[in-house]
Amino acid sequence: MTAIWRNTLTLAGAATLSLGIAYAQSPDLSDPPAIEGEVVGDHGSHTLRMGIGLAESSPQYLSSQYFADILEQRTDGRITVDIFPNSQLGDDVQMMEMLQTGSLDMTYPSSSPATTYVEELAVFDLPFLLPNREAAIAVMQSDTAQRMLDGFEGSGIKALAFSENGYRQLSNSARPVESPEDVAGLDVSGLTIRTMENPVHLSIWKTLGANPTPMAFGELFSAMEQGVVDGQENPWSTILTSNFHEVQDYGSETRHVYTPFIMMISERTWERMAPEYQELVQEAARQSAEYEIQLATEYDDWSREQLEEKGMQITRLDDEQIAAFQEAVQPVYDEWAPKIGEDLIAEIQEIVESSSIQ
Ligand code: TK8
């Protein structure tokens, strides 16, 4: 972990969460695939504590529940997983640290706060890099991505699988945003946009002329409620299942970054498990990640419609408007491409090009 990344990041205070009741309704979601395979041998019992950031109705939680069900069924109840949603146990950064010390078994953060462990992950933070979901999935399931997961080795964290957080959309409580100028306009009136704890995201919003501030997800709802921050950016499903529409009137379909989630386990917990259990945990992580991507896909447009029904004014940007944002953030590439690595970016762009749909 080199100084360049540590210096750039400022860590938010402990997460306090007031999300209120999770959003009950959900789209006609696909049921999880049937759990197949033999019950594995008896290598003792494990109760895994898993902390996640999002609400019970989120694709992140539902797929984690599927992960738990696979382990319980395939071990005849010898491995159980207790899931703690809504950042109850801390934010992404804190929970990764808890995996390192062994005070938590599993977590499921966004890739962005994990760039302090594996710098290559920052490639996912470059704006407009992944034009569509097919390209994103092709990248997440590539050898390049597997190399990033392997990059955690020796850090105290074992990274098991990528899944989808999703395409990030801007929301704010001040006005509709249709152009980079509108974003810059947000700053003129001193409005603040919350970002994840990640230097590339800070650069994106600074470059667009906003006034960005990094903050833990668990603090975001109350910070918006109290007017500490005026805007934020997340996938529609997170905005809906975290009830952000209660404190955000405007949304803009910027799709400016596709953020993955990474399912992780503490290396200490992993090393306490028999090889057959390790194999099963890895398999279950991949299966639940595939299911999570499916759920996140089904939630995306549906959540946007729900938010509009709940009164959020959502601006859909046309190709020309998106192109204006792409042009406006070009300086982010100039700043970060040399640090992230031109070769890595080229590797990802090649996967994107070869993925079926352009
Ligand atoms: C939840 C976070 C969240 C992320 C963010 O723990 O912080 O805005 O998008 O999903 O990982």
Image (tube, grey):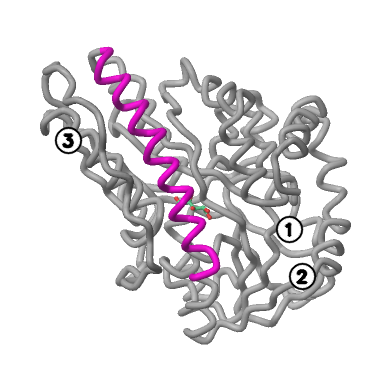
Three-letter amino acid code at disc 3?
Answer: Gln
Looking at the rendered structure, which numbered label has been put on residue 333?
Answer: none
Q: Nearer the viewer, residue 2 or 278?
A: 278
Location of residue 26 with respect to 285 vertically, above or below: below
Give the SS element for disc 3.
helix
**Relative height, residue 22 to residue 67 (above, below):** below
Give the Cα separation between the discs numbered 3 and 2: 50 Å
Distance from disc 1 to disc 3, alpha carbons, whole Å, reads 45 Å
Q: Earlier in the sequence, mark 2 or mark 1?
A: 2
Residue 332 or residue 297, whichever sits in front: 297
Q: Is residue 243 above or below residue 86?
A: below
Q: Which residues are magenta?
A: 275-302
Q: Say if mark 1 contacts mark 3, CB within 8 Å.
A: no
* Horizontal side, residue 107 vs residue 213: left or right: left
**Kind of element beneath mark 2:** helix
Identify residue for label 2: 183
Could you tell me which secondary element the residue under label 1 belongs to? helix
Q: Please state which amino acid type lies under the numbered disc 2.
A: Val
Does the magenta stretch mainly form a helix, a strand or a loop? helix
Tag 1: amino acid: Trp
Where residue 160 appears, as percent x and y from the top left, is 43, 29
Q: Which mark is residue 73?
A: 3
Asked if marks 2 and 1 touch (Cβ < 8 Å), the reply is yes
Q: Residues within 10 Å of mark 2 (few under 14, many from 20)?
A: many
Q: Which residue is mark 1?
A: 205
Label 3 or label 2, whichever lies nearer to me, is 3
First in sequence: mark 3 vs mark 2: 3
Q: Name the image quarter holding residue 137.
A: top right
